[in-house]
Image (tube, grey):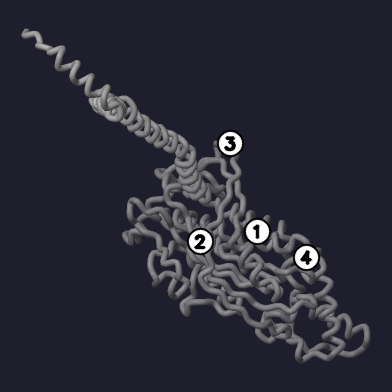
Amino acid sequence: MKTPNVNIKDLLKVFGFLRNNLALLVPILIAVVALLLFVPTTLLSGRLRHKIKSDSVDVARQIDSLVQEVAEAAQAEALEPYIEAYAQDANAIEDAIRQTTLRELLDYRVFADPNQTSQLVFDPFRRKYLEAVEAMLERVKAGDPPTDVEIYAALEASRATSGRGRTGMTRAGTSAGRLNVRGMSPLDRKIVEKICEDRAKTIKVYINPIDLGGYLYWSEWKFEDWDKAIRDSWYWQMAYWMLEDVLTTVEQMNKDADHVLRSPVKRVMNVQFTQTRTGRVTIGRSRRATAARDKQTPTYVTNVRNAMSATPCTGRFSSPAEDAVMDVMHFQVTVIVRAAEVMHFMQELCSAKTHKFRGWFGDQPEQTYQHNQISILESASGPVDREHFDHSSFQYGEDEVVSLDLICEYVFHVPAYAAIQPKVVADDIAGTGK
């Protein structure tokens, strides 16, 4: 390497020049120092930027990414209880729907073995249906008004005592024997009112078991063939559950009343599960019409033709599909109710009710479930002519009352009872039954 040749004389000349011109020395020194600082500073700043980028910015980005990932993980973890709760809600709803149809059977032997052939299993079912209806009537403290025969006898006794002669009424049991208070004298009317009022104070609601669907049917039932007996038992078991809900509603409505004169629900005129030839039954129908109607067995609603409602607003029908989840039946109920309690009765009818379940064969621990399966499809109400022969022996008290006529829908959860549903019933839904 060649050594630089420094001329001392030239340097002395420069220093001599600077000594003679001190004013230029300071700016020159500043320029030299700045030059010396500029080069390393530039190099340093480039290296610093690179280091900051690699050591700080990139790390910051990694930290931000990690923070986001942690936040997302924490958020997902925080959502897990909510997701699990929603799943539990869905399962609870499904289970609650299933429980609505897990109900006690009137007799556990009828549907226990699909291969049985003995007709002896049906007579216990017949008896238990009648006994269960009678037990419900006793529970709601139901009764009848005095019969026309009782009223006739009381009037005759009164006339004999007072010497007023005979009443001119024929005995009840003929069309002419129906009680007609409009043709009575004021005294006879008071006697009739007193007799009927005394009877009203001994009960909470007027109900005759003949007016409840199935009672007359099973009172006169006889075995004809196996398939019909199975159908009768199954469909009337469904009907009994509906009837039970109606009378439970009456019991709840009248729980605070001590007799029918103070009861919100005065009378149950009918609960029916089949249609007459003309469709809906008019209030005040005869016992003969009731008997004719009760010779029919209720069935599932599979289309508009066998629906009680002309156009069911729910649009629900029983379906033969393998994945069907509901069976549908209709029923009609007509009651005499306090005018101010009409809406309350409808709400109570559609409210949740409790029931027991011990397995489809009655061999499991008893469970208490809730059911709420009623929807009102149609409703109509009208005034009550208390002197009409359909009401003349009934005492409703001083309340303003109306007749309330409802057509209702009842829904069953198919998977809940599919294990015991008879094949002939499934064939009916599919349209392949006899």
For label 1, the SS is helix
Eye-nearest disc, 4 or 3:
3
Q: Name which residue lies at 54% across and 61% down.
A: 374
**Picture coordinates of residue 250, whole percent (x, y):** 68, 63
Q: Quadrant of the C terminus?
A: bottom left
Tell me the CA gap for discs 2 and 1: 15 Å
Q: Quadrant of the N terminus?
A: top left
**Picture coordinates of residue 51, whole percent (x, y):** 29, 25
- Which is more N-terminal, label 1 or label 4? 4
- Foreground residue among 150 and 27: 27
Q: Name which residue lies at 60% across and 44% down.
A: 368
Q: Name which residue lies at 75% across and 90% down.
A: 182
Which quadrant of the structure image shows residue 79?
top left
Amino acid type of disc 4?
Ile
Instruction: Identify the disc placed on residue 365.
Output: 3
Instruction: Identify the disc placed on residue 203.
Output: 4
Tell me the CA gap for discs 4 and 2: 29 Å
Question: For mark 2, does the 10 Å Cα neighbourhood hold few (<14), some (14 to 19), or many (20 or more) residues?
Answer: many
- Which is more N-terminal, label 1 or label 3? 1
**Picture coordinates of residue 34, whole percent (x, y):** 28, 27
Residue at numbered disc 2: 410
244 in relation to 345, above or below: above
Tell me the CA gap for discs 4 and 1: 16 Å
Amino acid type of disc 1?
Thr
In the shown orientation, is residue 361 left or right of residue 355?
A: left
- Foreground residue among 350 and 116: 350
Residue at numbered disc 1: 248
In the shown orientation, is residue 332 left or right of residue 422?
A: right
Amino acid type of disc 2?
Tyr
Q: Name which residue lies at 65% across and 58% down.
A: 248
Extreme-left residue of the structure: 2
Instruction: Identify the disc placed on residue 35.
Output: none
